[in-house]
């Protein structure tokens, strides 16, 4: 927050109280909180319910020792199944797997990292644990007291209630539920990234930022398979207008390193997520990574594409059967162009650089091959292997 915003905040607070402040400054604050897509790790894809305090500490340790922290990964996010019982006053406590959430947050913070949690707007989370419905302000205060920096808020059981009402009613209940938690988080005064998870219902990209979302899931859950990853990733075509600093489309967490895809398929996964300006939340076991997995997750050029400060999400430029060309405009005026081959066998992909705004042969850096390419003709052809990608940064 700059000096002017701080001054405005103080004036508004003095004049009209916190609610006017919430209404007046959401966009600015959101941009401060998630100026570039959040980066970190989340427990769900690999550990699901087998997550506990010791495992989270080990992941935080590994995030540092692997070089991931230095590459930009910050959030250590505990997904579903940490929740315990509410006490007589309604205060939520973690279950036995997490004996002391504040101590865990302190541990994570001491490493220069941040801690994230998960909850739901209904009575229950997706895994059947206690949700925040009816306890929003109380829970937000508890999270702030523990030192939580990120909240994934997953529709789950509230979704079942929405099935019983008319679509317009369902829409307003859902939006109000997200807005309520956003206001509760803001009221704590602690900067907490707010990540909406409702699988893209009701075209959330149209209204996610309006209810305070720093990111919103655009789809159902990813799995560690090329088909599902590709279905989700390539399915993001057309969503680029809705993302920008402070508010991002979220095609779900990464599967890199979980073992279900081939190297070229994980390359496609990373390339797409970076082009999509997607949150980069690793979903593997960081304590058991091959050098190849570490290299892929910490690839400097890929992270620079994802984290570009202009925040122009990339999009599909053209497709011909299973061959697709995507591009992303970068802050420095360069452009990232990806040649994706979604088929099983190698194919020639043709790029007409004129359609991407070029008039002369282009100089490119091949990101995955890490080599500079001499001037490429305006009518460029390249062989791309099955399920693989050629990713070019054009200067
Ligand atoms: C939903 C979400 C997942 C995960 C689980 C936890 O399925 O989409 O990302 O959070 O709930 O129960």
Image (cartoon, rainbow, N blue to C red):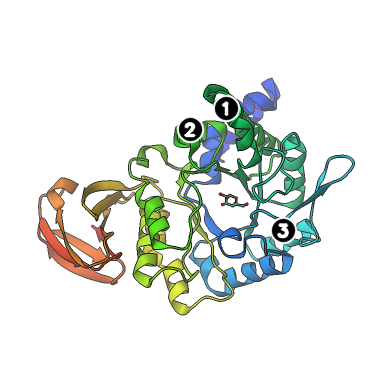
Label 1, secondary structure: give it.
Answer: helix
Q: Is residue 355 left or right of residue 165?
A: left
Q: Which residue is drawn at 66% across and 42% down?
A: 120
The front one of 304 and 176 is 176
Contact check, label 1 and label 2, Cβ < 8 Å = yes
Mark closer to the observer (1, 3): 1
Reading the image, the residue beneath label 1 is 170
Within 10 Å of disc 1 (Cα), the crowding (few <14, some 14-19, many 20+) is: some
Location of the N terminus (image quadrant): top right
Position of 367 relative to 86 (above/below): below
Residue at mark 3 to residue at mark 2: CA–CA distance: 34 Å
Location of the C terminus (image quadrant): bottom left
Q: Residue furthest right?
A: 88
- For marks 1 and 3, the one nearer the N-term is 3
Q: Residue at x 36, y 66 (%)?
A: 265
* Place of residue 55 in the rendered image (x, y in percent of width and height, measured from the top left): 68, 68
Reading the image, the residue beneath label 3 is 105
């Amino acid at each position: 927050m700059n000096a002017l915003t701080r001054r405005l905040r103080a004036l508004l607070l003095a004049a009209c109280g916190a609610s006017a402040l919430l209404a007046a400054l959401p966009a600015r604050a959101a941009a401060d909180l998630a100026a570039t897509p959040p980066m970190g790790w989340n427990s769900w894809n690999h550990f699901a319910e087998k997550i506990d305090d010791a495992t989270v500490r080990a992941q935080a340790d590994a995030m540092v020792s692997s070089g991931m922290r230095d590459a930009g990964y910050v959030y250590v996010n505990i997904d579903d199944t940490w929740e315990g019982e509410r006490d007589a006053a309604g205060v939520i406590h973690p279950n036995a797997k997490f004996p002391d959430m504040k101590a865990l947050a302190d541990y994570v913070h001491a490493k220069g990292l941040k801690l994230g949690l998960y909850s739901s707007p209904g009575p229950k989370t997706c895994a059947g644990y206690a949700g925040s419905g009816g306890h929003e302000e109380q829970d937000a205060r508890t999270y702030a007291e523990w030192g939580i920096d990120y909240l994934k808020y997953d529709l789950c059981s509230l979704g079942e209630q929405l099935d019983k009402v008319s679509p317009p009613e369902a829409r307003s209940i859902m939006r109000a539920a997200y807005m309520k938690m956003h206001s509760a988080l803001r009221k704590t005064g602690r900067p907490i990234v707010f990540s909406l998870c409702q699988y893209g219902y009701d075209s959330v990209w149209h209204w996610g930022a309006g209810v305070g979302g720093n990111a919103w899931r655009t789809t159902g859950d990813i799995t560690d398979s090329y088909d599902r990853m590709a279905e989700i990733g390539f399915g993001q075509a057309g969503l680029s207008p809705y993302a920008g600093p402070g508010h991002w489309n979220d095609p779900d967490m990464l599967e890199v390193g979980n073992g279900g895809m081939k190297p070229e398929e994980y390359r496609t996964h990373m390339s797409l997520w970076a082009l999509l300006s997607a949150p980069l939340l690793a979903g593997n076991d960081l304590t058991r990574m091959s050098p190849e997995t570490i290299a892929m997750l910490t690839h400097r050029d890929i992270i620079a594409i994802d984290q570009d400060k202009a925040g122009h999400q990339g999009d599909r430029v053209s497709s011909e059967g299973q061959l697709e060309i995507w591009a992303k405009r970068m802050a420095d005026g360069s452009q990232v162009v990806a040649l994706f081959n979604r088929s099983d066998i190698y194919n020639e992909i043709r790029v007409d650089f004129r359609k991407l705004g070029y008039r002369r042969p282009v100089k490119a850096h091949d990101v995955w091959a890490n080599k500079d390419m001499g001037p490429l003709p305006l009518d460029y052809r390249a062989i791309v292997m099955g399920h693989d990608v050629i990713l070019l940064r054009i200067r």
